[in-house]
C-alpha cells in the first residue's frame, strides 16, 4: 500500500474546514490531513449568504440539512433582491431558477420580450416561481416528482458564518483530521525545487508535509508569502475595497427568504436575515468614501437595533495568477476575492476543493494536474468577475462620483462581447459548466434595463392571443402554487431547521 500524502492545511476558517472535511470524506487513506489554525488570529466571520451549490457539497459529505441549519441559525434563500442598481427606485430579484418554461429550445425570455413589445406582458418576475415565493415570504421544497415549473428552482442558505467552520471541524476531526492550535511563524523550503517542506509554529513545533494548502485568508501566508504568487488586480473594474459590517436585531414579522443588495452612493449594502438576527454591511470604495462616513451610512440605513459597532473589513478584488504553485494550493480568500454581491466566495472555495479532490496528486505532483486546477480556478473567477461588473456598469445612475465612474469605465473584453451579443440578439453566452447560467444573466440584464434590440424570431409563434393566454395561465399557475406554500418561518420549523441560539 502507498503511504498517504501528508497534507497540511493552514487556516481554520470556512475554507480550511471545508477543505479538511472534503479530503477526509473523499480521500480516506489517501490523504493524511493536519490543520493548523490560530484562535488568536481568528476568522473573517462574515460571509452569510450562499449559492444552491453548497447543498450538493453538504449532501456529498453526508451532513444533514436540518442539523446544519439549526447549528448555524440558517434561513432559506431563493435569490437576491437587487434595489437601486439599474436606477434609483429599480428593483428586481435574481432568482435561483428559471423563468417560465423554454419552448422548443427557445428561452422563455424571448417570448416575454415579444409579449412586452406587443404590450401584453406582465412583469418578468410574475413568471418566476422562486421570485413570486420570495416576494410573498414563502418557501417549499421543489417536489421530487413535480413538473418543470415546480421543480426548476433551487435554494441556498443564509447562515451565521461563524458557526459553519466549527461544525465542519467536528465532522473532520471525527474522520481523522488532526488540528493543531498555533501560529505559523516560519516556512521551510527545499533549496532545489522551492517546494515547502515544513512549517514552524510559534511553539517551536515543526510540521512537515508533502502538500500544503493555504487557507490562511487574506494573509495568504504560503501562496502570497513563501511562494510569492503574483496577484491579478481587478480593482479598476471592481473598486469596492472595504465593508462596514453591522449585525442587527431581527424585527418581528416575516423572515425574508432572500438576501437584499441595495445600491448606495459608493457601493451597496447587504441585508441577510437569519433566524436570530440580521447581517448587514456596506461594501464601499475607499476612493469615494471614508470609513467613518460608511459607518454612519450603514448605521443610518439598518432597520433593527445594532448588536455591535460597525466593523471595517478591507479587501482587494482579484485573484492569484496561479492558485496552485509548486506544492502549495490556495483555497478561499488566500486564492482570490470577489465582493459578496452574488454570494460567490464560499462557492469558489467549494469549487476549488472539489477540483483538488479530482486532481489529488501523488507524492510527486504532475504539472498537468496543477495546470488543470489553475485553469478551472481562473475561468470560474473570471466569469464571476464579469457578472459582478455587469451589476455596476449596466446602470443609468449618475448621482455620485462612484456611479459615474463604474457606468463609464471600460469593461473586460469578455464582458463587452457578452453585452453586445445580448443587446443585439437577446442571447446569452452559453457555458457548459460553472457560474452563472442563462437565467442569471437574463435576470440582471433585464433587471437593470438592458432590453435587447431583437428577440429570437422563433418566438414569433404562436399568434398573439395564444401567447397572451399562455403567459396569463403561467402567471396564474405560479400564483396558485405559491399560495399553497408555507410561510418561510413555518417551513423552517416544519423542516426541523429552527435553532435555539
Ligand atoms: P478566514 O476566515 O480569514 O480564515 C483564515 C484562517 O487562517 C483563520 O483560521 C486564521 O486563524 C488562520 N491563519 C491565518 N494566518 C495564520 C498563521 N500565521 N498561523 C496559523 N493560522 C493562521 N462569502 C460568501 O460566500 N457569501 C457572503 O455573503 C460573503 N460575504 C462576505 C463579506 C465580506 C465583507 C467579506 C470580507 C467576505 C465575505 N465572504 C462571503 C467571503 C467569506 O467570508 C470567505 O470566503 C470565507 O469566510 C472563507 O474565508 P477563509 O477561510 O479563506 O479565511
Image (cartoon, grey):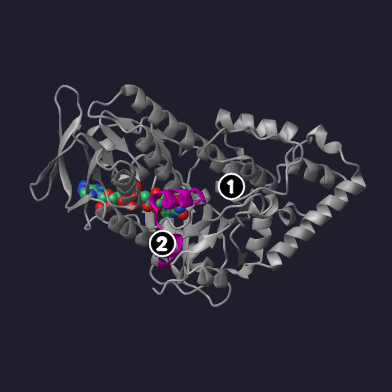
Rendered position, 249 above or below 149:
below
* Residue drawn 12% across the image and 49% down it: 202
Task: Give whichever of 313, 18 is nearer the camera.
Answer: 18
Measuring from the top left, give residue 288's x and y in whole percent.
49, 49
Q: Name the residue beneath numbered marker 2.
A: 68
Q: Is residue 331 left or right of residue 52?
A: left
Is 424 colored magenta in this rendering? Answer: no
Which-is-in-front pick, marks 1 and 2? 2
Query: Disc 1 on helix, strand or loop?
Result: helix
Residue at position x 68%, y 56% in the image: 129
Residue position marked by numbered label 1 in the rendering: 403
Q: Which residues are magenta?
A: 51-70
Q: Residue furthest bottom?
A: 252
Q: Earlier in the sequence, mark 1 or mark 2?
A: 2
Residue 293 appearing in the image = no
Residue 422 drawn at (x, y percent): 69, 35
Q: Residue at x 35, y 61 (%)?
A: 162
Residue closest to the eye, 132 or 342: 132
Image quadrant in which you'd find residue 32: top left
Left or right of 253: which side holds 126? right
Q: Quadrant of residue 189?
A: top left
Q: Main secondary structure of the magenta part?
A: helix
Amino acid at each position: 500500500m502507498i503511504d498517504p500524502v501528508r497534507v497540511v492545511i493552514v487556516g481554520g476558517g470556512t475554507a480550511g474546514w471545508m477543505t479538511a472535511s472534503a479530503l477526509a470524506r473523499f480521500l480516506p487513506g489517501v490523504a493524511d490531513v493536519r490543520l493548523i489554525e490560530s484562535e488568536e488570529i481568528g476568522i473573517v466571520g462574515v460571509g452569510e449568504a450562499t449559492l444552491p451549490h453548497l447543498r450538493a457539497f453538504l449532501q456529498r459529505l453526508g451532513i444533514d440539512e436540518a442539523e446544519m441549519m439549526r447549528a448555524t441559525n440558517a434561513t432559506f434563500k431563493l435569490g437576491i433582491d437587487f434595489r437601486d442598481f439599474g436606477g434609483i427606485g429599480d428593483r428586481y430579484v435574481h432568482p435561483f431558477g428559471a423563468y417560465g418554461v423554454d419552448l422548443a429550445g427557445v428561452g422563455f425570455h424571448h417570448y416575454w420580450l415579444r409579449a412586452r413589445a406587443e404590450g401584453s406582458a406582465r412583469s418578468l418576475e410574475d413568471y418566476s416561481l422562486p421570485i413570486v415565493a420570495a416576494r410573498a415570504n414563502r418557501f417549499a421544497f421543489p417536489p421530487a416528482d413535480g413538473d418543470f415549473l415546480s421543480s426548476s428552482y433551487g435554494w441556498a442558505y443564509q447562515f451565521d458564518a461563524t458557526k459553519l467552520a466549527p461544525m465542519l471541524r467536528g465532522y473532520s476531526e471525527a474522520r481523522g483530521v488532526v488540528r493543531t492550535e498555533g501560529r505559523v511563524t516560519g516556512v521551510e523550503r527545499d533549496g532545489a525545487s522551492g517546494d515547502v517542506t515544513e512549517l514552524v509554529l510559534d511553539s517551536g513545533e515543526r510540521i512537515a508535509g508533502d502538500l500544503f494548502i493555504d487557507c490562511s485568508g487574506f494573509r495568504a501566508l504560503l501562496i502570497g508569502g513563501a511562494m510569492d504568487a503574483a496577484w491579478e488586480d481587478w480593482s479598476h473594474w471592481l473598486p469596492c475595497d472595504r465593508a462596514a459590517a453591522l449585525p442587527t436585531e431581527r424585527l418581528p414579522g416575516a423572515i425574508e427568504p432572500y438576501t437584499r443588495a441595495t445600491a448606495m452612493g459608493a457601493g451597496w449594502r447587504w441585508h441577510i436575515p437569519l433566524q436570530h438576527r440580521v447581517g448587514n454591511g456596506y461594501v464601499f470604495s475607499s476612493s469615494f468614501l471614508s470609513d467613518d462616513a460608511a459607518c454612519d451610512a450603514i448605521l443610518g440605513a439598518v432597520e433593527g437595533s445594532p448588536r455591535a459597532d460597525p466593523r471595517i473589513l478591507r479587501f482587494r478584488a482579484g485573484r492569484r495568477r496561479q492558485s496552485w504553485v509548486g506544492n502549495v494550493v490556495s483555497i478561499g480568500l488566500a486564492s482570490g476575492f470577489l465582493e459578496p454581491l452574488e454570494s460567490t466566495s464560499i462557492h469558489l472555495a467549494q469549487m476549488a476543493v472539489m477540483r483538488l479532490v479530482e486532481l489529488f496528486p501523488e507524492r510527486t505532483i504532475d504539472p498537468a494536474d496543477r495546470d488543470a486546477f489553475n485553469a478551472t480556478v481562473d475561468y470560474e473567477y473570471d466569469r464571476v468577475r464579469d457578472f459582478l461588473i455587469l451589476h455596476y456598469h449596466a446602470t443609468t445612475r449618475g448621482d455620485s462620483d462612484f456611479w459615474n465612474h463604474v457606468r463609464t469605465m471600460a469593461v473586460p473584453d469578455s464582458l463587452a462581447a457578452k453585452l453586445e451579443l445580448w443587446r443585439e440578439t437577446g442571447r446569452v453566452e452559453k457555458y457548459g459548466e460553472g457560474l452563472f447560467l442563462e437565467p442569471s444573466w437574463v435576470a440582471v440584464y433585464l433587471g437593470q434595463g438592458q432590453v435587447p434590440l431583437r428577440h429570437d424570431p422563433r418566438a414569433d409563434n404562436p399568434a398573439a392571443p395564444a401567447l397572451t393566454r399562455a403567459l396569463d395561465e403561467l402567471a396564474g399557475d405560479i400564483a396558485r402554487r405559491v399560495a399553497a406554500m408555507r410561510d418561510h418561518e413555518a417551513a423552517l420549523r416544519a423542516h426541523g431547521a429552527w435553532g435555539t441560539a
